[in-house]
Image (cartoon, rainbow, N blue to C red):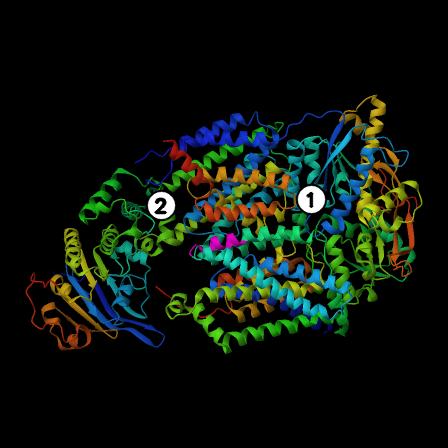
C-alpha cells in the first residue's frame, strides 16, 4: 500500500442549480485499499461515485486515474481506462439468463475490431463465463432469467459483470442493500474473496456499519456534500462528527474485533 | 442461447403455404359462352361517390343490357360475340403501385379476359407497361392523360374517349371565343399527371389562341384529395387574374366549389372546370350559376337532352335504376363497354365464330362507332385512342323543373380539339395546332 | 398589406383547425402516454355523424342554425361512445404493454374504423353546408371570407380557454396534473387512476370528434379524409411538445402560419415545410417547443 | 444446447422456392416476390425491434431504394438489376449513416416520431415535385441481368430469393455475434452496456444503418418486381405503418419469420381485397389487433410451436 495513488480526486465540485451536491472533495486512493464510503441519504456518496465513473460531469475539479486525467469522460471511456462500478439497483440484462448476462458482458469487453463480429458462443468466452459463475457462486442459477433472481444473487451477478472488464479499481454502490441480514456477510465474503483474487482496489458505499467495520481498511464519511472524515475504521467510527451526522449515537461505541460480528 | 427455435421444417411449411394458396385460386377454363370482365373504378375514398359509383353503374346497366340483348338497335344482339359477360367490380383506390399489383392479380390470378375501366390518369400511366406485359385487352374508360399512347405505341390498350388535350384545347377555344373580356388567367390543379398536363395544355392553347392573355406566376397544385382549400382560395382571390382554370374532379372538386362559393370566389372570378359536369347533378341547387363547365367530352349534363334513341335509352334506363341523371363517368364507362361489345361482334363476324383476342384487337383498331351520345373514332395512337367532339356550357339552375341546367353550350369538333395521328399534344399545340378543323 | 392580412388570417384559421384536432391527441398522450392513431377515426366519425344529421334535419325543415347544436351533440356523442368503447375494450388491456405496441394497436383499430365508416355511411360524400351558408361572408383585406371559417378561430380560442380552466382551476384538473406528473404516486395517494384514464380518453375523443364535426360543413365528407389529419396532428403535437396543451397551441400556430406563407408565396413546398419543422424541432429540442415539466427518475 | 437449424432450414427453403418457383402460377410468383422483397425490410426492422426501437419512418428507405431504381432507369437508362440494387443500397446506406448520427440519441416514441418526420419530409418533396413524378411516381422498366435480358419474371424471382437467403444468413450470423447480442443488451440495459465499455450510440447506429440498407434493398427489389414506384404506397406514413405491422405479424423469433410473415400478409391482403373489396382494411386491421392480443410472438410462434410439438 505504497507508491503513487491509483486514484486522485482533487477539489471536486458538483452543483445542481443552487444545490451543492459535492464540495471540495479531495481523496487519494492507493492500490489495494478497501475504502468504505458512508454518509446519510443525500450526503453526496452516490454523486461522488457517479462523477468518478463518468455518469455525472463534475462542475469543477480533477479526477486522475493512474496519473491520467479522466475528468468528465463518458462511462464507456472511464471503463476502458480500468475503472468499473456496480449499482445500488443492479444493472443486469433483465430478459437474459444469468449465463447469457455474463457471456454478453464478457463478449462486449472482448469486442475490439473483428471480435465484435465473431459468434458470441466461442470456447474462450464460454470457459471464462463458467469459471466466473463458479467464482461468484451463482452457477446454480445458470439458466434463470435475471428478472427472477433473488436480490443477493442479482447483486453478485451485477458485480461479476462489472468485473469482466478486469478493472483495477471498482466502485460498489451499496452492495448489500436489499439483501437480508442473514445473507449479507455471506455475500460480502463472496465478493471480497473474488475481488482479492483479482487484486482490485475497492471503494464501496455502505450504510451498514457492521460491514464497514469488518471489511474496510479506510472510511470516508460524507456530510452535505463534504468529506467530514477520512480515517481508518477504528478511528472513524468513534469520530464525534461521524457519530453525529452519519451513524447515529445508538451505535455501540466500543470497536469490536474483526470477525466477532453480532448476529441478530 | 437455449431459446432459439429450430426451423428445420421451414421449407416444408413454405411449400404447404404455397399449395394452400394455390388451392384457393380458381383456375377456370373459359368457355366460349362466357367472358370475364373486370371493371375497376373508385369504390372507396373521396372519388367513389362523384366518380366511381356512377362509373360502375354506367358499366352495369350496359353490361346487363348486352347480356340480355336489350340495347337499342343496332346493338341489340345478345352478349359479347354471343358470350355472356360475368363482371367483377374492383376498387381503384390505394395508389398506382397498388393498382399495378392488383392488375396482375386480376389477369394472372382471377383470369380476366378483358379489363374495362380506370378513372385516374395515375392508374393508367402506371398500368400501361404491365398491360402490355401481360397481353390482356384493356379498355381505358375515363382516365385522361395523353401520355399513355404518346409515350409508346400500345397493342393491348384502347381508350374509347378523347384524352385531356381535347378538354383543355376546347376550354381555351370556349374562353377565348365566348369570353372576350378575359385577358389573364391562373390555375388550381392537382399535383399529378392529370393536373399538370391539363394546365400545360390549357396554358399553351390560350397562348396560341390569344397571345395577349397573361398567365399568373403563382399556380396552385395542391395534393390530390387534400379536401381543404381555404388558403388556396385566398391566394386565388388575391391573384389579379380574371379567370381560373381547374381540372379538379371528384370530392376535391365538390369541396372546392363549396368553399369557393362561400368565399365569393365565383362572383369575383370566371372559372372554367374541365371536369365540372359531375358536380352539377350532385350539388344541385348549391352549384353556383355562371361557372364554365365541361364534362370531358359530350357526356353527362351537356348531352342530357340529345334526342337519339341510344341516348334516350341510356338516360332513361339509368334514371329508372339509380334515380338520377347519368353524369359523365356513367357515359364514359358505358361507352367503353359498348365499344368492347362492338369490337367483339365485329371480330366474330369476320372470323365466323368466337374471336381470339388478336382478332378482337384487330377489329377494335381504328374502329368508328355511334355511341350513346356521340360518334367515336379510334383515330389516334395507331387506332387505339378515340377522338370525339368536346364542349362547354355555363351553369344555370333550372328553377322551373328544379334541376340543374346549362346554357350557352358550344361543341367543337373532334378534329378541332385533338391533334392528328403521329403528333404529340404538346408539340401540336406549340406548333400552332396545325391541321385543326374547327 | 392585403397579402399579409390574408396570410395571417388564413394561417390562423388553419391553426385553429389544427389546434382543435390535435389538442385531444396531446391530452391523451400527456395523461396516458398513448399516441392514439384512432384519433383520426374520432375526427372522421365526428364529421360523418354531424354531416349526416345536419342533412337529415335540414330536409325535415329544421332551421339551419340548429346545425350548430348538431355539431356539438355529434361531437359529444361520438367521442363518448367511441372513446368509452375503445378505452374499455382495447386500451385497458394494454397499459402494461410497450407504448409503441399500443400505437400499433390503435393503428389496427383505425383501419377497422375506416372501413366501418363505409359500411355505415356508404361511399357517397356528405355535404352539410347549412351552417356555413347561414353565416354568409364578409370582406376582409380585399377578399371575401366566410364567417363560418372565421368562427373556427373563436372555437379554438374557446377550447383553449376551457382546457386551461379545466386543468388549472378545477379539482378534476388537479387530479389530472397529479396523474400526468406521477402515475404511481397518484395511485398511492388514492386517486382512481382508472377513472381518470377513461374520462381523459373520452375528453380527447370528444375534442377529436369536434374537430371533424366542425370542419364538416366546409368540406365534402368523404371516406378516408382522416388519413392526412393524423400525421398533421402528430407534427403539431411533436412541435409543441407531446402532452402539452400550450404546446399544441404553439405548434398549431407555427404550422398553420408556415403553411399559409408557403401556399401564398411558394406553393411547391407546402407539404414539405410542415414536416421539415417537425424534424428540426425534434433534432434541436426533442421535448418540443413547450414541453411540460417532467420528473426525472434514475 | 439444442442445435440451431435456422441456416439449413433457410437453405432448404431457398432450394424449394427457386425450383418450385419455376412451376407456380405467375400471380403466386408475384406475391412471393413482393412478400420476400418486403421481408428484407422486416429483417432490418426486426434487428431494431430487438434493440427496443420501432421506426415509424422506414418507408423513407423503402422509398429511397425504390426511387433510386426509378431515377437510374429514367435518367441514365440503367436496367441492370445488380447495379440498381447496389446503388439503392449505397444511397440508403449513406442517408442512413447521416441520419443515424441524429437518431442514435433517440429512444421510444421520440425515435419513432423523428423517423416519421424524416420520412414525411421525403414524402413532401416527392409529392410536390413534378421532376420526381409527384403523386404519380414513375414506371420502372424490367431489369436486365449483366446484359442478359431474359423474358418473364423468373430470373428476378430467383434473385430475390437468393438475396433474401443471403440477407437472412448474414443477419443470423450477425445476431449470434457480439454486435448482434448488443440488440437485446441495449434494450435491456443501456447503462450496463456503457459500463462494459461499449458505446450504445454506436451499437444503435450500426443497427440503424443496417436496417436502412436492408429496407433500401427491399424498396429496390419491389420497384423492379412491380415495375412502378409512387409516394403514396411507398413513402407515406401508412407505408411505414405497414412495415411495422408486418414486423409484428411476423414476430421477432427468427430470421425466417419475416419471410413467412410477409408472404402471409401479401396473401391476406390479396384475398381480403378480392373477397371483401369494401372491407379489406378492416380485415387487415383486425388481423393486426388479433396478433397483438393473442399472438405476441407473431406468426413465427405458431411455427415454433408446431416444430417443437414435432419433436
Residue at image point 86% right, 39% down: B420
Number of numbered markers = 2
Q: Which mark is on residue B135? A: none
Q: Quadrant of the C terminus of chain C?
A: bottom left
| Contact check, label 1 and label 2, Cβ < 8 Å | no
| Residue A225 image point, x, y percent | 26, 73
Task: Identify whether A244 is placed above or below B120.
Answer: below
Q: Main secondary structure of the magenta part?
A: helix
Could you tell me which secondary element the residue under label 1 belongs to? loop
Q: Quadrant of the N terminus of chain C?
A: bottom right
Q: Residues within 10 Å of mark 1 (few under 14, many from 20)?
A: many
Task: Identify whether B313 is placed above or below C231.
Answer: above
Q: Is residue D223 visible?
A: yes
Residue at image point 61% right, 74% down: C158
| Residue B154 image point, x, y percent | 75, 34
Q: Quadrant of residue C296?
A: bottom left
Residue designated by label 2: D181
Measure the alpha-carbon separation of dots 1 and 2.
46 Å
Viewer-side label of 1, 2 = 1
The chain identifier of the residue carrying mark 1 reads: B
Q: Which mark is on residue B92? A: 1
Nearer to the camera, D285 or C93: C93
Q: Which residues are magenta?
A: C96-106
Left or right: where B297 falls relative to B32: right
Nearer to the camera, B207 or C241: C241
Amino acid at each position: 500500500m505504497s507508491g503513487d495513488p491509483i486514484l486522485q480526486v482533487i477539489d471536486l465540485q458538483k452543483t445542481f442549480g443552487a444545490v451543492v451536491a459535492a464540495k471540495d472533495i479531495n481523496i487519494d486512493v492507493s492500490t489495494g485499499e478497501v475504502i468504505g464510503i458512508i454518509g446519510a441519504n443525500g450526503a453526496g456518496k452516490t454523486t461522488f461515485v457517479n462523477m468518478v465513473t463518468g455518469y455525472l460531469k463534475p462542475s469543477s475539479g480533477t479526477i486522475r486515474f493512474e496519473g491520467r486525467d479522466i475528468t468528465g469522460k463518458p462511462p464507456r471511456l472511464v471503463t476502458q481506462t480500468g475503472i468499473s462500478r456496480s449499482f445500488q439497483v443492479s444493472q443486469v440484462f433483465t430478459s437474459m439468463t444469468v449465463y447469457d448476462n455474463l457471456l454478453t458482458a464478457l463478449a462486449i469487453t472482448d469486442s475490439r475490431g473483428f471480435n465484435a463480429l465473431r459468434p458470441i458462443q466461442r470456447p474462450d468466452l464460454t470457459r471464462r463465463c463458467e469459471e466466473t459463475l463458479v467464482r461468484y457462486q451463482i452457477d446454480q442459477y445458470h439458466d434463470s432469467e435475471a428478472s427472477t433472481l433473488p436480490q443477493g444473487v442479482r447483486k453478485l451477478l451485477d458485480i461479476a459483470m462489472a468485473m469482466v472488464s478486469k478493472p483495477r479499481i471498482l466502485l460498489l454502490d451499496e452492495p448489500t442493500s436489499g439483501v437480508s441480514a442473514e445473507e449479507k456477510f455471506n455475500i460480502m465474503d463472496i465478493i471480497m474473496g473474488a475481488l482479492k483474487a483479482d487484486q482490485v482496489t475497492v471503494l464501496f458505499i455502505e450504510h451498514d456499519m457492521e460491514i464497514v467495520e469488518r471489511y474496510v481498511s479506510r472510511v470516508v464519511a460524507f456530510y452535505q456534500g463534504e468529506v467530514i472524515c477520512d480515517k481508518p475504521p477504528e478511528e472513524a467510527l468513534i469520530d464525534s462528527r461521524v457519530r453525529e451526522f452519519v451513524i447515529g449515537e445508538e451505535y455501540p461505541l466500543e470497536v469490536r474485533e474483526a470477525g466477532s460480528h453480532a448476529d441478530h | 442461447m437455449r431459446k432459439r427455435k429450430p426451423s428445420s421444417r421451414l421449407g416444408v411449411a413454405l411449400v404447404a403455404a404455397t399449395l394452400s394458396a394455390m388451392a384457393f385460386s380458381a383456375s377456370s377454363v373459359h368457355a366460349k359462352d362466357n367472358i370475364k370482365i373486370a371493371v375497376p373504378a373508385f369504390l372507396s375514398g373521396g372519388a367513389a361517390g362523384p366518380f366511381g359509383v356512377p362509373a360502375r353503374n354506367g358499366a352495369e346497366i350496359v353490361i346487363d343490357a348486352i347480356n340480355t340483348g336489350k340495347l337499342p338497335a343496332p346493338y341489340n344482339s345478345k352478349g359479347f360475340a354471343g358470350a355472356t359477360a360475368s363482371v367483377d367490380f374492383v376498387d381503384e383506390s390505394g395508389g398506382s403501385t397498388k393498382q399495378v399489383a392488383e392488375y396482375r392479380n386480376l389477369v394472372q390470378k382471377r383470369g380476366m379476359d378483358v379489363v374495362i375501366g380506370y378513372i385516374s390518369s395515375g392508374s393508367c400511366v402506371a398500368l400501361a407497361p404491365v398491360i402490355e406485359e401481360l397481353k390482356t385487352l384493356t379498355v381505358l374508360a375515363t382516365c385522361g392523360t395523353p401520355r399513355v399512347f404518346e409515350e409508346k405505341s400500345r397493342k393491348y390498350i384502347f381508350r374509347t374517349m378523347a384524352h385531356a388535350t381535347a378538354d383543355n384545347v376546347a376550354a381555351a377555344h370556349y374562353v377565348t371565343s365566348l369570353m372576350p373580356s378575359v385577358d389573364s388567367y391562373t390555375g388550381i390543379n392537382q399535383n399529378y399527371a392529370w393536373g399538370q398536363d391539363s394546365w400545360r395544355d390549357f396554358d399553351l392553347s390560350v397562348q396560341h389562341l390569344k397571345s395577349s392573355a397573361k398567365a399568373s406566376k403563382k399556380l396552385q397544385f395542391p395534393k390530390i384529395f387534400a379536401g381543404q382549400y381555404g388558403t388556396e382560395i385566398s391566394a386565388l382571390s388575391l391573384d389579379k387574374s380574371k379567370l381560373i382554370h381547374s381540372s379538379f374532379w371528384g370530392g376535391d372538386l365538390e369541396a372546392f366549389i363549396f368553399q369557393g362559393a362561400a368565399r365569393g370566389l365565383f362572383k369575383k372570378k370566371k372559372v372554367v372546370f374541365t371536369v365540372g359536369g359531375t358536380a352539377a347533378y350532385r350539388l344541385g341547387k348549391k352549384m353556383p350559376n355562371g361557372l364554365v363547365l365541361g364534362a370531358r367530352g359530350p357526356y353527362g349534363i351537356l348531352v342530357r337532352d340529345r334526342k337519339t334513341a341510344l341516348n334516350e335509352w341510356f338516360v332513361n334506363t339509368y334514371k329508372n335504376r339509380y334515380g338520377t341523371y347519368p353524369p359523365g363517368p356513367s357515359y364514359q364507362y358505358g361507352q367503353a363497354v359498348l365499344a368492347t361489345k362492338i369490337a367483339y361482334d365485329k371480330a366474330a363476324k369476320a372470323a365466323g365464330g368466337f374471336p381470339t383476342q388478336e382478332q378482337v384487337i384487330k377489329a377494335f383498331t381504328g374502329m368508328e362507332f355511334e355511341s350513346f351520345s356521340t360518334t367515336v373514332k379510334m383515330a389516334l395512337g395507331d387506332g387505339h385512342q378515340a377522338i370525339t367532339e368536346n364542349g362547354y356550357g355555363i351553369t344555370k339552375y333550372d328553377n322551373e323543373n328544379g334541376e340543374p341546367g346549362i346554357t350557352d353550350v358550344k361543341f367543337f369538333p373532334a378534329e378541332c380539339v385533338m391533334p392528328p395521328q403521329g403528333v404529340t399534344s404538346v408539340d401540336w399545340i406549340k406548333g400552332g395546332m396545325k391541321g385543326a378543323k374547327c | 398589406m392585403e397579402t399579409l392580412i390574408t396570410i395571417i388570417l388564413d394561417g390562423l384559421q388553419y391553426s385553429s383547425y389544427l389546434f382543435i384536432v390535435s389538442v385531444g391527441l396531446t391530452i391523451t398522450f400527456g395523461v396516458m402516454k398513448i399516441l392514439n392513431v384512432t384519433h383520426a377515426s374520432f375526427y372522421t366519425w365526428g364529421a360523418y355523424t354531424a354531416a349526416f344529421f345536419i342533412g337529415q334535419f335540414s330536409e325535415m325543415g329544421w332551421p339551419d342554425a340548429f346545425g350548430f347544436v348538431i355539431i356539438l351533440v355529434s361531437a359529444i356523442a361520438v367521442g363518448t361512445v367511441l372513446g368509452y368503447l375503445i378505452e374499455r375494450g382495447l386500451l385497458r388491456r394494454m397499459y402494461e404493454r410497450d407504448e409503441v405496441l399500443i400505437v400499433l394497436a390503435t393503428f389496427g383499430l383505425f383501419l377497422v374504423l375506416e372501413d366501418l365508416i363505409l359500411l355505415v355511411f356508404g361511399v357517397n360524400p356528405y355535404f352539410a353546408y347549412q351552417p356555413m351558408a347561414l353565416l354568409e361572408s364578409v370582406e376582409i383585406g380585399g377578399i371575401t371570407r366566410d364567417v363560418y371559417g372565421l368562427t373556427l378561430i373563436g372555437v379554438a380560442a374557446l377550447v383553449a380557454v376551457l382546457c386551461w380552466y379545466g386543468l388549472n382551476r378545477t379539482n378534476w384538473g388537479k387530479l389530472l396534473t397529479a396523474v400526468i406528473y406521477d402515475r404511481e404516486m397518484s395511485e398511492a395517494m388514492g386517486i382512481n387512476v382508472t377513472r381518470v384514464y377513461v374520462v381523459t380518453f373520452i375528453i380527447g375523443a370528444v375534442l377529436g370528434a369536434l374537430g371533424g364535426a366542425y370542419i364538416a360543413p366546409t368540406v365534402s365528407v368523404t371516406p378516408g379524409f382522416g388519413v392526412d389529419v393524423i400525421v398533421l396532428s402528430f407534427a403539431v403535437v411533436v412541435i409543441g411538445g407531446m402532452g402539452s396543451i400550450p404546446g399544441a397551441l404553439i405548434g398549431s400556430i407555427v404550422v398553420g402560419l408556415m403553411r399559409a406563407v408557403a401556399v401564398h408565396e411558394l406553393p411547391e413546398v407546402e407539404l414539405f415545410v410542415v414536416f421539415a419543422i417537425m424534424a428540426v424541432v425534434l433534432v434541436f429540442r426533442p421535448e418540443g417547443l413547450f414541453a411540460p415539466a417532467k420528473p426525472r427518475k434514475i | 444446447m439444442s442445435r440451431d437449424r435456422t441456416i439449413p432450414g433457410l437453405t432448404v427453403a431457398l432450394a424449394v422456392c427457386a425450383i418450385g418457383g419455376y412451376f407456380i402460377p405467375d400471380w403466386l410468383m408475384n406475391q412471393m416476390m413482393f412478400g420476400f422483397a418486403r421481408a428484407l425490410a422486416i429483417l432490418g426492422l426486426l434487428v431494431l425491434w430487438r434493440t427496443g426501437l420501432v421506426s415509424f419512418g422506414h418507408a423513407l428507405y423503402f422509398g429511397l431504394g425504390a426511387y433510386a431504381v426509378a431515377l437510374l432507369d429514367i435518367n441514365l437508362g440503367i436496367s441492370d438489376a445488380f447495379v440498381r440494387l447496389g446503388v439503392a443500397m449505397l444511397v440508403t446506406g449513406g442517408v442512413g449513416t447521416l441520419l443515424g448520427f441524429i437518431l442514435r440519441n433517440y429512444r421510444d416514441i421520440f425515435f419513432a416520431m423523428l423517423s416519421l418526420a424524416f420520412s414525411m419530409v421525403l414524402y413532401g418533396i416527392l409529392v410536390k415535385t413534378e421532376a420526381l413524378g409527384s403523386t404519380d411516381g414513375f414506371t420502372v422498366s424490367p431489369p436486365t441481368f449483366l446484359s442478359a435480358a431474359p423474358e418473364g419474371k423468373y430470373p428476378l424471382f430467383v434473385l430475390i430469393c437468393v438475396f433474401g437467403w443471403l440477407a437472412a444468413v448474414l443477419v443470423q450470423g450477425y445476431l449470434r455475434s457480439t454486435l448482434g447480442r448488443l440488440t437485446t443488451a441495449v434494450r435491456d440495459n443501456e447503462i450496463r452496456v456503457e459500463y462494459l465499455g461499449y458505446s450504445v450510440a454506436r451499437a444503435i447506429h450500426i443497427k440503424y444503418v443496417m436496417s436502412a440498407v436492408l429496407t433500401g434493398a427491399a424498396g429496390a427489389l419491389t420497384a423492379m418486381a412491380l415495375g412502378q414506384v409512387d409516394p403514396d404506397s411507398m413513402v407515406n406514413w401508412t407505408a411505414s405503418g405497414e412495415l411495422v405491422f408486418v414486423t409484428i405479424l411476423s414476430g421477432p423469433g427468427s430470421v425466417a419469420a419475416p419471410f413467412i410473415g410477409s408472404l402471409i400478409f401479401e396473401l391476406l391482403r390479396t384475398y381480403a381485397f378480392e373477397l371483401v373489396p369494401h372491407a379489406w382494411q378492416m380485415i387487415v386491421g383486425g388481423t393486426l389487433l388479433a396478433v397483438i392480443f393473442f399472438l405476441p410472438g407473431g406468426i413465427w410462434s405458431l411455427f415454433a410451436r408446431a416444430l417443437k410439438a414435432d419433436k
